[in-house]
Amino acid sequence: MCDQDHFEHDLAHYAERAALTRRQLGVLSATAGLSLLLPRAANAAELTEHDALITTPDGAADAFFVHPASGAHAGVLVWPDILGLRPAFRQMGRRLAESGYAVLVVNPFYRMKRAPIAPAGASFADQATRDLVMPLARSLNATTHVTDAKAFVAWLDAQPAVDKTRKLGTTGYCMGGPITMRTAAALPARIGAAASFHGGGLVTAAPDSPHLLVPQMKAQYLFAVAENDDAREPEAKNALRDAFAKAGLAAEIEVYPAAHGWCPPDSPVYDEAQAERAWERMLALFQRALR
């Protein structure tokens, strides 16, 4: 997960693999140039997008909604990593929408702060950024994950751009990984597919560990695991495989040769080749499970 104790060591180890330097990433993020990093989907749909405020039991959550300009499509709920809703995730949402999905990217920290929660170009590698975002992350728990998931899914299902005859998908990055599992377990009739990218805290010793919720799910899954996360918790992937096998649910669980945080294009350990491979596996899952 976004582990403060290990992050700086891993950053030094993996930074040389990164496709861009942190300085370049900061410039791109500050100038909204992240679209230059991500290829457009084949036969990309023309899009409509807007910011949204979504009523939840705890207030009004800010979010970004993007979808093809015409028709109704399978919906996807995106849970960002610990740096929250920002230009990189808006661009990732647009890219997914270009492939034919109605995509809602949420700010999970809305109770305490509207997005963006950190300055443009901020990195978890910086102590000031960690001091800013860690309290926000600690303010969330299994209960808030579920109440938010229900509110966000209800909002999606009320949108004309969302085809309610199709199952919904959900994706999560870093701290968003376990939230996808709680979403899938809380709304099994709606969530048909889910993907966790370098998710943290998927398997724990706690009685509310996300992997214990698998029997309540009906979703097919993709777990794209960072190799340094796997090195620290090598049995986690086996516990996930066992839980999904016992539940009779399809789950693709793979350790990628990349660092925790490799998927968002503004990450200091962004790995373009492995991020693209994980993205293609997600699209393949959604093609099977949501269409």
Image (cartoon, grey):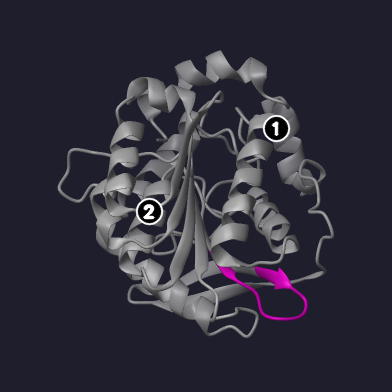
Q: CA distance from mark 2 to mark 1?
A: 30 Å
Disc marking residue 38:
none
Q: Residues within 10 Å of mark 1 (few under 14, many from 20)?
A: many
Horizontal side, residue 145 vs residue 269: left or right: left
Q: Is residue 104 left or right of residue 276?
A: left
Residue drawn at (38%, 39%) of the image: 200
| Above-or-below relation of 90 to 33 | below
The image quarter in which residue 41 lies: bottom right
User: The magenta stretch spans which residues?
Assistant: 66-76
Read off the residue under disc 1: 272
Q: Which residue is disc 2 drawn over?
A: 249
- Tell me which amino acid carries mark 2: Leu
Q: Considering only vertical position in the picture, is 28 above or below 284?
A: above
N-terminal of the pair, mark 2 or mark 1, is 2
Q: Is residue 84 visible?
A: yes
Please state which of residues 145 and 190 is positioned toward the viewer in this rendering: 190
Is 82 rendered above or below residue 115?
above
Write the residue at 58% across / 74% down.
52
Q: Nearer the viewer, mark 2 or mark 1?
A: 2
Q: Nearer the viewer, residue 236 or 119?
A: 236
Kindly tell me whether residue 201 is visible in this rendering: no
* Residue type for callout 1: Glu
Looking at this view, is 192 or 181 the one in front? 192
Give the quadrant of residue 204: top left
Query: At 78% from the left edge and 48% from the top edge, which residue is drawn?
Result: 35
Quadrant containing the N terminus is: top left
The answer to which of 51 and 152 lies nearer the viewer is 152
Horizontal placement of 34 versus 144: left or right? right
Residue 73 on the magenta span? yes
- 39 horizontally vs 207: left or right: right
